[in-house]
Amino acid sequence: MTETNGSGGGPGAADSGAESSDVADSAAGIVVPIARLADRLDDPTVRVVDVRDAWEYDAMGHVPGAVNVPFDTFRDREGPDAGTLPGAAAFADLLGEVGIDRSDTIVAYDDTNGVFAARFLVTALVYGFEDVHLLDGDFSAWKRADSAPPDPVENEPVAPDPVAVEPMRVEGPDSPIIGYDDVVSLLESPGDDVVFVDTRDADEYAAGHLPGAARFDWTEAVDPDTRGFRSKSELRDRFAERGITPDRPVVLYCNTARRLSHTYVALRWIGFEDVHIYEGSLTDWRERGGDLVAED
């Protein structure tokens, strides 16, 4: 499947949504089931990315064929782009070093319910990698799944030949991210019916959140038994309880744009089309002196 690279048009302007391919199981194929990935491990166009630390990848093994792109290698607070994005050139070099180019289908995973891998996915979308997906579950879920291959763990590092990747960054209405000025404008335009969603925990939200923001802790989307996402119907119900519905543009934030990435994937998977990310999140908001609302 070729997943679209954002919501297309900024908050308030939806695109046509995701398309499907045989690595995904539905029209909203941003999330890939374990069984589907297991069936495609021998496909050279499907590239699996493990975003755990290098020591975990080396000591605990990994999904067969997976390359290691540790989380810290694509996070850079001092980089040229907003938030913790590393910059287009750095990200192109990083993926080129592990043999991934723009024609590949990418499936990312971690061992923390997908939250770190979701951040990789969002970063890849920003830098023009369109066919990117999140494994439904994590490495622990993969190892115990009946649908995993007979030998689910490989212990030898994978070191493919590097490839040249031209740097690019998706800009404007096609980008999944928005900045501070956009957030200020949307907060001052209630007629747009944008719902801001705080993906942090209850204590963090109570200490200070954007005016009018709904709260949806990213962990609420996780099924504790499967370590992947809850069912689509349950997710839709949980979001709707907070006023987060497909007819409203959504802007997500947290502290540093990691946790919100998981919620972004959840919303895209269940069919939300108008979803954006405040990349700088509250780190940027506070640095600029933005107003926050505290709960009593």
Image (tube, rainbow, N blue to C red):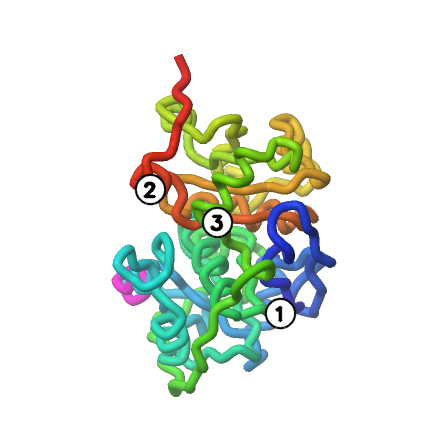
Position of residue 4 in the picture relative to residue 44 (left or right): right
**Residue at (67, 38) in percent of width and height:** 248
Q: Position of residue 94 (x, y in %)?
A: 36, 74
**Mark 2 sits on what residue?**
283
The relative height of residue 293 versus residue 281 in the rendered view (above or below) is above
Q: Is residue 56 magenta?
A: yes
Amino acid type of the residue that numbered disc 1 sits on in the rendered structure = Asp
The relative height of residue 173 versus residue 262 in the rendered view (above or below) is below
**Which quadrant does the N terminus fall into?**
bottom right
Q: Position of residue 214 (x, y in %)?
A: 54, 29
The magenta segment is 53-58
Amino acid type of the residue that numbered disc 3 sits on in the rendered structure = Ser
Instruction: Give neighbour class at mark 1: few <14, some 14-19, many 20+ (Cα, 10 Å).
Output: few
**Residue at (26, 59) in percent of width and height:** 78
Numbered label attached to residue 39:
1
Depth-wise, is mark 2 or mark 1 nearer the camera? 2
Amino acid type of the residue that numbered disc 2 sits on in the rendered structure = Thr
Under tag 1, what secondary structure? helix
Depth-wise, is mark 3 or mark 2 nearer the camera? 2
Under tag 2, what secondary structure? helix
Q: Is residue 140 magenta?
A: no
**Mark 3 sits on what residue?**
261
